[in-house]
Every structure is written in structure tokens, then in C-alpha cells.
Image: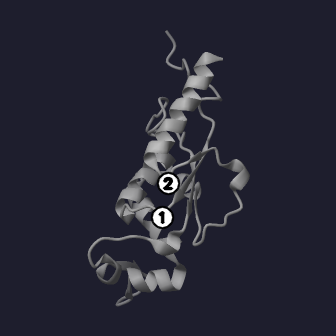
Amino acid sequence: MSQTIGKTRLAYSRAWHLVDVGSDPRPLGRIASKIALTLMGKNKPIWDPSTDCGDYVIAVGCRELHTTGKKRFQKQYYHHTTRPGSLKSLTMDRMIDKWGGAEVLKRAVSGMLPKNRLRAPRLARLKAFEGVAHPYKQNIIQSRHDSSTAELSETKIGLSISRS
């Protein structure tokens, strides 16, 4: 029997998911891990570690990121320019002021993706915005701001496909 049963072009089609980070009560790490799973495609039955079968994710409201404890003021982001003595550090609060909450979310998701050749294309499918306005309104099929409604809509979609 062939190993490629069910791996059709329709199975690899990409959906667009909307995540409202500002109104979600979960902290940054919990949201970033769910986004990383969606970008990898682990929620699909055809998931394979060596193929890129993930979906697009649109994160809106990144200005109001929720963190626990004192992470916003104590977490440090480091980068080095490869010159001696040039280790630079930046707190999360300063990073949000300088580049916005979208950059913080992208770095959190990037840290949760596997470190391989698929990391950059997967991260490119994450579209993060500071406000609620975004140019991808026509592409969105499912909204992921409430996990229970998203699972319910997936079930309804699956039922309507199986009945027809």
C-alpha cells in the first residue's frame, strides 16, 4: 500500500487563523506555543516533521501583550555584533517601546519553532499587528481568539464536509 494516501493538494492547503492577543487572558508563552503548533501544522492529520504543512496565523492586538510576574521589566533580550565587548541587552519593556509587541511575539514564537531549514518560512507565515486592523480580512476562515469556539467551528466544518 502506498504511503501517500490522503496527502493530496487539498490536505496541504493553508488556512488563515486569527488570534486576538490583546483580549486573550493567556500569557505570552501560552499564546506563542499555540501559534507555533499551528505554524508547524501539528493540528493536521498529515503532519510530518520534514514537510511544511502549517497554516497562516494573524496576531492582532500585540500592543496589549499579557505577561506574568515581572517579566516585562526583568526579561532581557541579547544580541551580539561579533565585535569584542559588544554584547547588547534590551528589556522586554524597552523592546515593546522601540519595536512594538509584535516583535516580542515573533521572538517568542521563533524560540518555540524547531531550529531547522523550515523555521524561516514558518515564521514568515506569522503576521503580527499592533492594533486590530490588518489587510488579511478576506483570507480568514477561522478565528482562534477563543479555543472552544475554534474547535467547535472546526467540528462544524468537518461535519458539513462529511455530510455532503
Q: Residue at x 45, y 38 (%)?
A: 43
Numbered disc 2: secondary structure = loop
Mark 2 neighbour density, 10 Å: few (under 14) some (14–19) many (20 or more): many
The quarter of the picture where residue 29 lies is bottom left
Query: Which residue occupies the foreground of this view, 55 or 135?
Result: 135
- Residue 79, can we see it? yes
Residue 17, given in percent of the width and then of the height, sits at: 57, 49
Q: Which mark is residue 39?
A: none
The residue most toward the top is: 1
Numbered disc 1: secondary structure = loop
Q: Residue at x 52, y 78 (%)?
A: 100
Left or right: where 163 falls relative to 45 = right
Residue 60, given in percent of the width and then of the height, sits at: 56, 64
Q: Earlier in the sequence, mark 2 or mark 1?
A: 1
- Residue 40, can we see it? no
Q: Which mark is residue 23?
A: 1
Mark 1 neighbour density, 10 Å: few (under 14) some (14–19) many (20 or more): some
Left or right: where 25 falls relative to 118 = left
Residue 41, given in percent of the width and then of the height, sits at: 49, 41
Q: Residue at x 51, y 70 (%)?
A: 62
Amino acid tagged 2: His
The residue most toward the left is: 69
In this rendering, is residue 109 above or below 90?
above
Residue 63, given in percent of the width and then of the height, sits at: 51, 75
Tags 2 and 1 touching, CB below 8 Å? yes
In this rendering, is residue 157 above or below 112?
above
Left or right: where 136 falls relative to 20 = right
Amino acid tagged 1: Ser
Which residue matches tag 2? 145
